[in-house]
Image: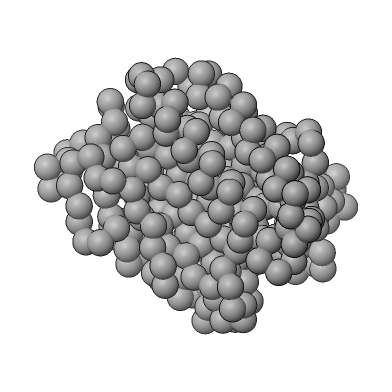
Amino acid sequence: MQTQNGVPACHNEGDNTICVPDATMQYRFYGLTDAGSVRSNNEDALAINADQGIVVLADGMGGYNAGEVASGMATGLLHNALAGWLTTGDHLVPQHIVSKLQFFTEQVNRAILNAASAHSQCAGMGTTLVVGVFRGSHLVLGHIGDSRCYRLRDGRLEQITKDHSFLQEQVDAGLLTSAQAAVAPGRHLLTRALGVETDIRLEIHTHIVQEDDLYLMCSDGLNDMVSDAEIAAILDGKPDLARQADALVRQAIAHGGRDNVSVVLIWVQPQTLGAA
């Protein structure tokens, strides 16, 4: 298994769990990615920057290794753009982050399109994207495609992104129930992706963060293999990000591991535990 971590702002615990204070909230991050049981390459990519509260996760698609190229470009370019901008000031106003997130994502989209046009082996590549900026008591969350973000609050797990997929549109139209969509064919037919069209629609929402919230960002290699009830059971209890991330990935593999699987956990550590 491969791990991703940011640079610690206060101290490390273990190899990847990072504690970072941010104005009124303190966040801890842990990321894990695995190729799964079937595929030889990993087309998922992660970028975590604990200092700036940035998490970017992408699930690439395309022939040969093009999916890896697209997801790597998406996470690398978007992380670098956001981190460079956030280091120039406090930027705690969510509206400013929303505006810049849309702008930078449009730039990344053009870069992927240009790379696909310039290199024949990358033709047709694209990627999903879920990106979070945790600043103060707010999460600015953007996504495109079917990579997800969940929130565990007061013991209740909630999916706070909505898949951009054909089946989700069927559910929204009342033609399928969520349970029917979960087992229906065509689950991977996306209605939006990065690097596919010149005009992109990044869905962005701002969420109020509460102490002891636990956020999960993941590629569909997790939620295709592991039910929401199983995810909730693994995340329930005292946060242990390394153990929980490993358990999520192992559960996906135990259920077949048909796709790459990537997870990032973000815990809003209660202030009373800040010195622990």
Q: Nearer the viewer, residue 110 or 219?
A: 110
Residue 246 in percent (x, y) is at 39, 69
Q: Report how many numbered discs are placed on residues in the image.
A: 0
> Residue at point 71% right, 69% down?
64
Q: Tell which residue pokes out farthest to the front in this image.
A: 118
> Residue at point 67% right, 32% down?
106
Q: Nearer the viewer, residue 200 or 172?
A: 200
> Residue at point 27% right, 49% down?
18
Say which quadrant the N terminus sits in: bottom left
Residue 27 in percent (x, y) is at 31, 41
Residue 146 in percent (x, y) is at 67, 52
Q: Is residue 20 above or below residue 103?
A: below
Q: Tell which residue pokes out farthest to the left in this image.
A: 275
Q: Is residue 238 left or right of residue 75?
A: left
Q: Is residue 157 visible?
A: no
Q: Is residue 184 visible?
A: yes
Q: Quadrant of residue 182?
A: bottom right
**Colour basis:** one colour
Residue 52 in percent (x, y) is at 36, 35
Q: Is residue 20 above or below residue 101?
A: below
Q: Nearer the viewer, residue 271 or 34?
A: 34
> Residue at point 62% right, 71% down?
259
